[in-house]
Image (cartoon, rainbow, N blue to C red):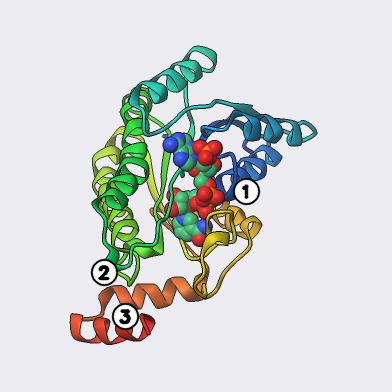
C-alpha cells in the first residue's frame, strides 16, 4: 500500500481535486503542483481552470483542467474516464467541491437542504462511484473528503450545511474501516474558517479566519501525517472538538450565546 509521506515529492502522483477553480481547491492544486504533482483540476468554470493551468506552467508539476459538474453523475463518469484513459490511475483524490448557504431556522427551506445534499454530499458520492473501484483495484490510493468543523454538531444558521458535512464525516468514518484492508486510505478534512470567495460573502464574524495558503499547506501536510482527520486551525479545532463532546444542556447554552 502506498501511503503518502508529508515530506515526499508528489512527482509522478496523479491527483484529482474537485472544486479547484477557486478558494481552497485552487490553492491546493497550486501547492500540490509546486511539489511536483500532476493535478487534474475539476470545477464547472473552464475559464478559471484554464487560467489556473497557465498560472502553474512554471511549477515542477502540472495542472490539467478537467471540467465537470459533480452533481451530474454522467459528467463525473466522463471526467473519471478521461483520467483513466490518460493516466490509468488516481493516487490522491481531494473531494472538495462544496457550498454554504446560511439557513436561519425560521427561514428554513428544503431547497437549501437539497442544494447542500446534491453538491456537498452527492457530489462526493458521484466521485466515489468512480474512485473506489479504481483504488481497490490498484490496492492503493488516498481518498480525502473535505467536510468542515461545522459538521461536528448542529450550529446556529447552519442546519443544511452542517447536516451535509456531518453526513460526509460519518460516511468517511465508515469508508475508512471498509477500505483500509484494500490498501485505500480514507481521510476527512475539517477546516475552520478559511478566507475564500465562499466566506467573503459571509456577513457574520468568523473566528480564527485563516488565509487560503496556510489552509492548503495544512491539508497537504495532513495528507502525509494524519491517519484520518485533518483538522485546522489548531486552537479553533480543539474548541470545536470540545463542543462536540459536551452534553446537550451545556452545548445549547453555548450555541444560544453564539446566536445572539
Ligand atoms: N472556506 C471555508 O471557511 C471552509 C471551511 C470549512 C470547509 N470548507 C469546505 O471547503 C470546500 C471549498 O470551500 P471554498 O471556501 O474554497 O469554496 P469556494 O471558494 O466557493 O469554491 C468552491 C469550488 O467548488 C466548485 N464547485 C461548485 N459547484 C460545483 C459543481 N456542481 N461541480 C464542480 N465543482 C463545483 C467551484 O467551482 P465552479 O463554480 O467553477 O464549479 C469552486 O471551485 C467546500 O466543500 C467547503 O464546504 C470551507
Residue nearest the viewer, comparing 174 with 2:
174
Q: How far is disc 1 from disc 3 in space, using C-alphas?
A: 39 Å
Q: Earlier in the sequence, mark 1 or mark 3?
A: 1
Residue 4: in sight, yes or no? no
Q: Is mark 2 within 8 Å of ligand 1?
A: no
Q: Position of residue 41 (x, y in %)?
A: 57, 32
Q: For the residue carrying disc 3, how many other residues have a C-alpha within 10 Å: few (<14), some (14-19), or many (20+)?
A: some
Q: Which residue reaches farthest front?
A: 107
Considering the numbered disc 2 on the image, is that residue within a helix, a strand or a loop?
A: helix
Considering the numbered disc 1 on the image, is that residue within a helix, a strand or a loop?
A: loop
Q: How far is disc 1 from disc 2 in space, using C-alphas?
A: 48 Å
Q: Tell me: residue 51, above or below residue 257.
A: above
Q: Position of residue 128 (x, y in %)?
A: 34, 33
Mark 1 lies on residue: 7
* Residue 22 as seen in the image, left or right of residue 152: right
Q: Earlier in the sequence, mark 2 or mark 3?
A: 2
Instruction: Report the disc number at residue 106.
Output: 2
Residue at the location (62% across, 26% down)?
A: 64
Q: How far is disc 2 from disc 3 in space, using C-alphas?
A: 16 Å
Instruction: Report the disc number at residue 255.
Output: 3
Q: Quadrant of residue 40?
A: top right
Considering the numbered disc 3 on the image, is that residue within a helix, a strand or a loop?
A: helix
Q: Tell me: residue 158, above or below residue 109.
A: below
Q: Position of residue 136 (x, y in %)?
A: 33, 27
Tag 1 and tag 3, C-beta contact below 8 Å: no
Residue at the location (38% across, 73% down)?
A: 240
Amino acid at each position: 500500500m502506498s501511503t503518502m509521506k508529508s515530506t515526499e515529492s508528489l512527482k509522478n502522483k496523479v491527483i484529482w481535486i474537485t472544486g479547484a477553480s477557486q478558494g481552497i481547491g485552487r490553492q491546493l492544486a497550486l501547492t500540490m503542483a509546486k511539489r511536483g504533482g500532476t493535478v487534474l483540476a475539476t470545477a464547472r468554470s473552464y475559464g478559471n481552470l484554464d487560467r489556473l493551468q497557465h498560472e502553474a506552467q512554471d511549477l515542477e508539476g502540472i495542472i490539467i483542467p478537467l471540467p465537470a459538474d459533480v452533481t451530474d453523475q454522467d459528467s463525473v463518469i466522463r471526467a473519471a474516464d478521461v483520467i483513466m484513459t490518460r493516466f490509468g490511475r488516481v493516487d490522491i483524490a481531494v473531494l472538495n467541491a462544496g457550498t454554504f448557504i446560511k439557513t436561519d431556522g425560521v427561514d428554513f427551506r428544503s431547497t437549501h437542504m437539497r442544494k447542500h445534499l446534491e453538491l456537498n454530499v452527492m457530489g462526493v458520492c458521484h466521485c466515489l462511484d468512480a474512485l473506489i473501484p479504481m483504488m481497490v483495484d490498484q490496492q492503493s490510493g488516498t481518498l480525502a473528503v473535505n467536510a468542515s468543523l461545522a459538521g461536528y454538531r448542529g450550529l446556529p444558521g447552519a442546519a443544511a450545511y452542517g447536516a451535509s458535512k456531518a453526513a460526509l464525516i460519518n460516511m468517511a468514518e465508515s469508508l475508512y474501516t471498509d477500505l483500509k484492508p484494500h490498501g485505500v486510505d480514507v481521510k476527512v478534512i475539517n477546516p475552520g474558517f478559511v478566507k475564500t470567495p465562499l466566506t467573503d460573502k459571509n456577513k457574520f464574524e468568523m473566528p480564527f479566519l485563516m488565509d487560503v495558503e496556510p489552509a492548503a499547506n495544512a491539508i497537504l501536510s495532513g495528507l502525509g501525517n494524519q491517519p484520518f482527520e485533518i483538522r485546522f486551525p489548531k486552537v479553533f479545532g480543539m474548541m470545536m472538538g470540545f463542543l462536540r463532546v459536551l452534553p446537550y444542556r451545556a452545548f445549547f447554552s453555548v450555541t444560544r450565546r453564539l446566536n445572539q
